[in-house]
Image: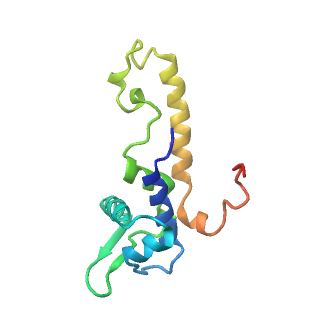
Amino acid sequence: MKITQESDYALRVVLYFSSLNPGTKVSANIVAEDQNIPLRFLLKLLQKLKKADIVESFMGVNGGYALKKEPKDISLKDVIEAIEGPIHLNRCLLDPEQCNNKGPKKCLIHNALYSVQETLINKLASINFKDITDGYYLGNSSIKS
């Protein structure tokens, strides 16, 4: 599984809003410039985040976008699912009827991947944006330079 560029941008946008004072409204132009995201692309993903009740939009001179929920109430899973839909490692796990290898009850690969998928989903659900902005995950990275 690979997180798409759109999900990566969405995670960065929610982190950006999470670092602001609660209720702070920011125009899409400012977010796009600050986060180095093409404006047209940003507007599309903001609509998906709005539909998922993660952000809200305000019209008018003092309009813009702001978080609709507190950062502690938004998980990585929430944002990824707002953009991608349900998280699944393969088609069989999204729709068990798609399994063409003995069916989901007998397919050993299906059952093993299901366990991995549940672990991934639970971990993504356990990480919220307050913890991220508070630096809880600093130093926990094993990213290669």
Report the residue at 37% width, 78% height from top: 27
What percent of the width, then of the height, locates residue 40? 33, 64
Q: Given the current orientation, which residue lies at the most extreme left position? A: 60
Report the residue at 54% width, 64% height from top: 129
What percent of the width, then of the height, locates residue 107? 46, 16
Q: Given the current orientation, which residue lies at the most extreme top position? A: 102
Residue 137: image quadrant is bottom right
Above or below 61: residue 145: above
- Identify the colour scheme used: rainbow
Report the residue at 41% width, 64% height from top: 38
User: In the visual, does 5 lie left or right of 133?
Assistant: left
Count every numbered label the image shows and give the total. Answer: 0
Q: Nearer the viewer, residue 93 or 3?
A: 3
Report the residue at 50% width, 23% height from top: 111
User: In the visual, does 49 lie left or right of 143?
Assistant: left
User: In the visual, does 126 lie left or right of 25?
Assistant: right
Residue 53: image quadrant is bottom left
What percent of the width, then of the height, locates residue 19? 54, 74
